Amino acid sequence: MRTTPTTLRRHRGWTLLLAVAVTVLSASAQAAEPTAEDRERARALLLEGREKLKAGDGEVAVRYFQAAHAIMGVPTTGLDLAKGLVALGRLMEARAVALGVTKIPPTPDETMAFTRARRAAAELAEELANQIPALVITVKQPAGVQVQVLVDGKAVPAEALGLPWKVNPGKHLLVVAARGFQAEPRQVTVKVAESLTVELSLSPETGAARALPEAPRRVGGARMSPSGESSASPPSRGEVTAGPGGAGPEVPGWVWIPGGAGLLALGAGLVFAINHAAVRGTVSEDCPANLCDWNRYDDAKATALEAQWNRSLGLALGFGAAGLLGVGSALYGIVTAEPARPSDAEERKSRRDLGVVPWAGDKGAGAALVGHF
């Protein structure tokens, strides 16, 4: 077959392109490989973490293991991290890490230590599957009422109620809430491999708004209470409530403004606190040991999750502080309210002591106004 110059140039072009591609891929693979310095750092962290774990300092040991695994990402570092999490009682995170170790693909030239670590991680994951406890949550609810159940701030789907809900051993806070009912928190403790049945109930909501006294209103010269009863006391600037006989403190009317705003802010802070707890639960479940599964979380999703964490925490703290400030101002106004003026009390007393006495005599008849002046 005859080879033309054009064909020859084309073959040379493809050969050059293939050579460049191989060079780039080789460089990328070499860049991804840990350096000798990285291996030494990870080895030192791993050995120090094992010493901390033997000494009973599991929290610090896990930090060392996390750092070593972040550097190397090999079966041996992952296995040590899983064992450290087990020592802390974080069985669900430990099993997730162990399963991640089993998914690390073997290489043709890997050492026996990696092979043994991968096998040990598979055995640990299977063992933990039987040790992780569960909560079986049921709710006594009226017909037609939709409830929301939170476990440590994480919402439990309605479809999962009555079914095993896997949790770490230890104490857990359960909250059930529904419109028109009070939120009922309950703390339970579950042991390793235990399946604990918990029945939650709802109580009718008393309502914070109904608990607040309604400001009296005036009709003409009389003061009308929320119940409809009237008292013949004259209007007094800034007076909202008074003690028996009018001698109690005059609560200024302005306290209702910061008090009401403070309660609203506290409610908003509670909503964002629950949202932050839900985000924490998501991070704990999807990103154990602060290591997200990149098959599920790319950079954008991980950044969005972190932003939601920071936003909900900041708003919860901000609204909470504003609410406490408003309620505190209202309480200060109530506590420092001045007593009722003596003149008002005396006037109310004199009005109660006034009376009309009819009289009759030889020269006529009439009525006399009597009382203490």
Image (tube, rainbow, N blue to C red):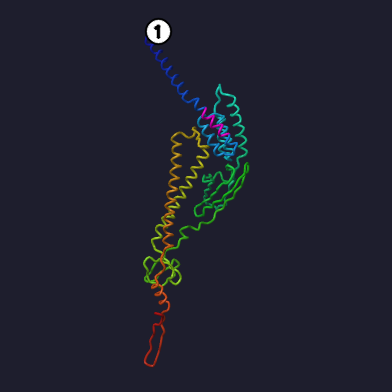
In the rendered image, which quarter contains the C terminus?
bottom left
**Placement of 28 over or under 365, stated as above or below:** above
Is residue 44 rendered magenta in the image? yes
Image x and y of residue 73, in percent: 52, 30
For disc 1, the marked residue is: 3
Q: Which corner quadrant of the image does residue 325 belong to?
A: bottom left
**Placement of 146 over or under 293, stated as above or below:** below
| Residue ID at (48%, 26%) | 32
Dot 1 alpha-carbon crowd within 10 angstroms: few under 14, some 14 to 19, many 20 or more: few
Q: Which corner quadrant of the image does residue 92 belong to?
A: top right
Residue bounds of the magenta highlight = 40-50
Image x and y of residue 197, in percent: 61, 47
Total numbered labels placed on residues in the image: 1
Q: Which corner quadrant of the image does residue 136 belong to?
A: top right
In the rendered image, which quarter contains the N terminus?
top left
Task: Please name whichever residue, 367 or 340, is drawn nearer the observer in this view of the structure.
Answer: 340
| Residue ID at (39%, 66%) | 239
Considering the numbered disc 1 on the image, is that residue within a helix, a strand or a loop? loop
Is residue 321 rendered magenta in the image? no
**Placement of 322 over or under 40, stated as above or below:** below
Residue farthest along the top direction in this orientation:
2
| Residue ID at (49%, 44%) | 278
Task: Please name whichever residue, 356 or 245, is drawn nearer the observer in this view of the structure.
Answer: 245
Residue type at the position of mark 1: Thr
Residue farthest along the bottom direction in this orientation:
362
Image x and y of residue 133, in percent: 60, 42
Image x and y of residue 127, in percent: 62, 35
Magenta segment, prevailing SS (helix, strand or loop): helix
